[in-house]
Image: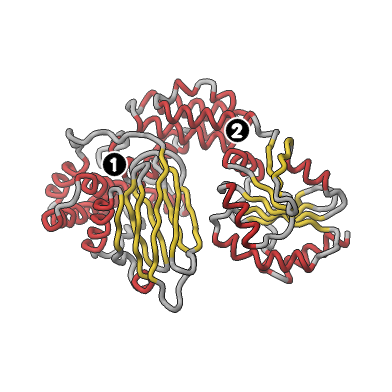
Amino acid sequence: MNKFLIVIVLAILTSCDSNQKNIEIYRGKVIIAGNIELSDSYSKVISLSYPCSIDRCDYQTEIIDSTGNFKFEIEILHPQDVLLKYEKGFAQLFVKPLDSLNLSLNSISFKKEKFPEFKISGNNSETSQNILDFLRFKNIDDFHPKSENKSVEEYLMDIKHRMFIEDSILSEFRKSYNPTKEFLTWAKKDIIYRNANYLIDFKFHHFMNKTQYKGELFDKSLFPVNDESAIISSSYGIHIWHYSTDKYIQKDSVIMNLLKEQKLSQAYEICLKNIVEYEQSGISRDIMCYRIISKFFEDSFEDFSELRKDVNLYLNNNLLITLLQKRKEEFEKQNNYHVSLLDPVTEEEKEIIGDFFSNLTDKHKGKVIYLDIGATWCGPCKSEIPYSIELHDYYKNKPIVFVNLCMSSDRNEWKKAIENLHIAGENYYLDKAQSQLLRNKLKWKGFPTYMIIDKKGNIVDDDAPRPSSDSRIKMRLNELIDK
C-alpha cells in the first residue's frame, strides 16, 4: 500500500468540513420501541447501551412481553449512536434528543447474524437504515492490531492502514446508496475514533509487560481532540477520555504523586488548569473537564464541594454547569437520604428521612439483614426474584429481614414490579439522585448486588451470594443467625 496515498486519504478524512455545523448539546428523551417476530425458542431479554460522549455509558435491559413487544425510554444530551442487542445480533441506531423510533425484528435472524436486517420507522430512521446497510456492506474481518515488538510509529501505521481501507469502503458505499449527510458525518467520525480506541490496547500491553515505549501514541493530527462535530460518534467520548487521562494525569508525575498521597483536591485542580491552558476552548475541552470533575466527584465527596466553587473556570457550556450543580446539590444531601418505603398492606409510600442505614439497623436491632440492591430494568435482578421469594419463605419466623432496595429506576415501574412479581420483604425506593449518593457511599459493583448486615449493624459481606446460589447463601445466613 502506498504510504503517501494513505496520508492523503486520511488528511481528507480527519479534516474539518467547513459546512459541518457543530453538534448542539441539549437534553431530551428518546423512545425506542418495537416488536420481535418470535420463534419457538427465544430470549426474553433485550438490551440497549448508549455511551454518551459527555457522560458515562448507560445500559438498560428490558423483558420482552409474550407478544414480542419491548420499549426503551432513555435520556441523551446530543445526537449519537446507540446499540441494541438481542440474541447474537446487534442493531446500531442513530438518535437525537426527543426522537422516537419503532423497530420490527425477527428472532431467528438475530440468532444467526451479527448485523441482521430489520425494519425501522420514525425520526431519523433513514440514517439508522444507512448505518445498517453500511455495516452489512462493509463485510470485512475484525481488526485486532498487534502490539508485540512494534514501535509507536509501526502501531499507528497499522491503524492508519485500517482507516484507509474503511474509508475506501465508505466511498464505494456512498456511490451506491446516496446516504444522508448525518450518516456520512457519523461514519467518518466513527472510522477515526473507533480505531483510535485501539491506542489503549498498545498502552495496556506495555503496562502489563512493564515496558516503556517512545513516541506520541495519542497523535492529535491523526485523532483530533477538538472536533466538536465528532460527538455524534460514541467512540469520540471514549477517545478524549483516554487522551485526557493519559496526558494530564498518568503522564504527569506531580499529579500522580499527589494522588498517591491522597491529596485529591490538589491533583484534580492542577489537572483541570492544565487542560484549560493547553487545550483549545470549546465543547470538547468542556467534556474533558466535565468528565475529570465527575471522576473527582466519585472519588471524593469531601473535596469535590471545594472544587465545585470554581467550576466556571473550567466549563463554558451552561448545560454541563447545570449538571454539575445538580451533583453539588446531591452532595449536600449525602447524609440526609429521603427513601420511600412501600407499605405492603396499604400500598402507601412513607418517606424515611436521615441516614438510610442508621434507620434500617435501628429498626431491626438483633436481626440479620439480607440486602438486595437492584433496578426494574435489570434482567439478572428479575431472574433472581423467584429464588428470593423461596429464600424469604425458608427463613420465615427467623431473626432475619429481607430488604429490597430499588435504585436508578422509574417509581411507577417499581410499584408495578412489587405487585406483579410478588416481591417479598421490605421494599425501598431511591430516585436517581439518591441512588447516586448511596452508590458512591457503598461503591458496589453493579446490579444486582447482595449485602449482609449482621445483628450488630455491621456490613459483613458486601458481595454476598445470590438467592439462586441456594446452599451457599443459606450456609452464610445460618452462620450469622446462630451467632
Residue found at the far bottom of this picture: 40
Residue in view at x 81 percent, y 47 percent: 457
Quadrant into which the N terminus falls: bottom left
The type of residue carrying mark 1 is Phe
Question: Could you tell me which secondary element the residue under label 1 belongs to?
Answer: loop
Residue on which the image places disc 1: 223
Residue 89 position, x and y percent, is 37, 66
Residue 337 position, x and y percent, is 68, 37
Q: Is residue 171 left or right of residue 287?
A: left
Residue 80 vs 371, above or below: the answer is: above
CA distance for labels 2 and 1: 36 Å
Q: Earlier in the sequence, mark 2 or mark 1?
A: 1
Decide which of 418, 330 is in the foreground and name it.
418
Mark 2 and mark 1 in contact? Answer it, CB < 8 Å: no
Residue in view at x 23 percent, y 50 percent: 160
Decide which of 45, 31 is in the foreground and name it.
31
Residue in view at x 39 percent, y 41 percent: 53
Residue on which the image places disc 2: 330
Is label 2 or label 1 in front? 2
Q: Is residue 291 left or right of residue 18?
A: right
Residue in view at x 48 percent, y 64 percent: 64
| Residue 153 shows in this picture | no
Residue 342 position, x and y percent, is 70, 49
Decide which of 94, 262 is in the foreground and name it.
94
